[in-house]
Image: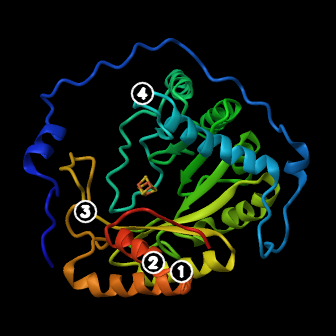
């Protein structure tokens, strides 16, 4: 098996980005702001509604949901095209945690020594984004639901300001009472990250441990009006799991998106423990199996999709890009 390089970008750029001698910008001084206490439930009738036993064949989107999505995506985009100036952010990623409750061996994007975001920072960031016309906010981590009350406050505050809110989570902490609070506050999408059917070496993000939470989340999407999709990372040791998860998503009429697993772009410090002996890394001898999997995904989802779009899908997946692929 080939050895894994410590980083994959140009040496000079890696050195600039990882060098401790560079001058970091001074963070703004805290102003002691806090986030308002959310009202819950805002919609008691939704809280009481268990949702349909069986998912409808076709999802109907009412006017309030179309308005919410347009306000988040379409209007800021149009504004960005007609207003002068160059800085008109459409989407923003708010890393409210750097800690994580899991340890996926390919992941260098968490560090359990870093404290979570303060209410002061969250509030000022949301206000700043709002003033610049941004209306899509993705809660990221680490695991953004490590402090569920904090996540609830952030979602509530941002939704009140008209943001369309996306939550990326491994769902281990997505208990019904947490999911209800986030949905009631105005979450628009739950992006549930899973890589395996059951926990396996290097891949703890699995479906079986979260299945009861996920099934309830999927039922309640028809009550609250959010979307659910699965986010799957294609690794050396999960090609069969990817098929199984995809079929599960397909059967439940939810979307999937895919990544191709990659070794670290930048050299990591000692918070990343799994550079060597990592069963998730894809080596040249695995390329054929990964290619076959991507071909299978293409055929499964959309045999009738025009060739040009299928090619774009193919190129992007093979380039390791995120693909939103709605079932
Ligand atoms: S759950 Fe997400 S943030 Fe946590 S270790 Fe896995 S990939 Fe990284």
Q: Is residue 178 left or right of residue 296?
A: right
Q: Is residue 72 left or right of residue 58?
A: left
Q: Badge 1, how many Cα within 10 Å: few under 14, some, many 20+?
A: few
Q: Residue at x 68, y 62 (%)?
A: 213
For the residues labelled 3 and 1, the Cα–Cα distance comes to: 32 Å
Q: Which residue is mark 2?
A: 310
Q: Is mark 3 within 8 Å of ligand 1?
A: no
Q: Nearer the viewer, mark 3 or mark 4?
A: 4
Q: Which residue is mark 1?
A: 305
Mark 4 and mark 3 in contact (Cβ < 8 Å)? no
| Residue 72 quadrant | top right
Q: Which residue is mark 4?
A: 85
Q: Nearer the viewer, residue 156 or 176?
A: 156
Question: Residue 64, relative to residue 26: is it above or below?
Answer: below
Q: Secondary structure at mark 2?
A: helix
Q: Nearer the viewer, mark 1 or mark 4?
A: 4
Q: Nearer the viewer, mark 4 or mark 2?
A: 4
């Amino acid at each position: 098996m080939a050895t894994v390089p410590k980083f994959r970008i140009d040496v000079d750029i890696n050195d600039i980005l990882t060098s401790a001698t560079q001058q970091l910008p001074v963070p703004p001084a805290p102003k002691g702001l806090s986030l308002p206490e959310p009202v819950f439930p805002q919609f008691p009738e939704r809280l009481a509604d268990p949702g349909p036993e069986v998912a409808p064949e076709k999802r109907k989107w009412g006017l309030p949901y179309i308005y919410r999505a347009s306000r988040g995506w379409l209007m800021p985009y149009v504004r960005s095209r007609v207003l002068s100036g160059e800085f008109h952010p459409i989407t923003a990623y708010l890393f409210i945690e750097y800690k994580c409750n899991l340890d996926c061996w390919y992941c260098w994007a968490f560090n359990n020594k870093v404290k979570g975001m303060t209410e002061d920072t969250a509030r000022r960031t949301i206000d700043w984004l709002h003033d610049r016309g941004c209306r899509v906010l993705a809660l990221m981590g680490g695991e953004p639901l490590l402090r569920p009350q904090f996540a609830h406050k952030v979602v509530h505050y941002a939704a009140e300001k008209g943001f369309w809110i996306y939550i990326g989570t491994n769902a281990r902490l997505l208990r019904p009472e947490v999911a209800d609070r986030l949905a009631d506050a105005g979450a628009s999408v739950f992006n549930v990250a899973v890589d395996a059917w059951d926990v396996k070496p290097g891949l703890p993000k699995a479906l079986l441990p979260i299945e009861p939470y996920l099934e309830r989340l999927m039922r309640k999407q028809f009550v609250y009006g959010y979307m659910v999709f699965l986010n799957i990372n294609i690794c050396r040791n999960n090609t069969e799991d990817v098929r199984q998860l995809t079929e599960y998503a397909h059967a439940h009429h939810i979307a999937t998106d895919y990544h191709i697993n990659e070794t670290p772009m930048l050299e990591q410090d000692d918070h990343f423990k799994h550079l060597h002996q990592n069963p998730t890394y894809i080596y040249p001898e695995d390329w054929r199996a990964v290619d076959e999997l991507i071909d299978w995904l293409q055929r499964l989802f959309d045999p009738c999709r025009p060739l040009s779009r299928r090619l774009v899908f193919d190129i992007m997946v093979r380039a390791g890009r995120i693909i939103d692929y709605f079932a």
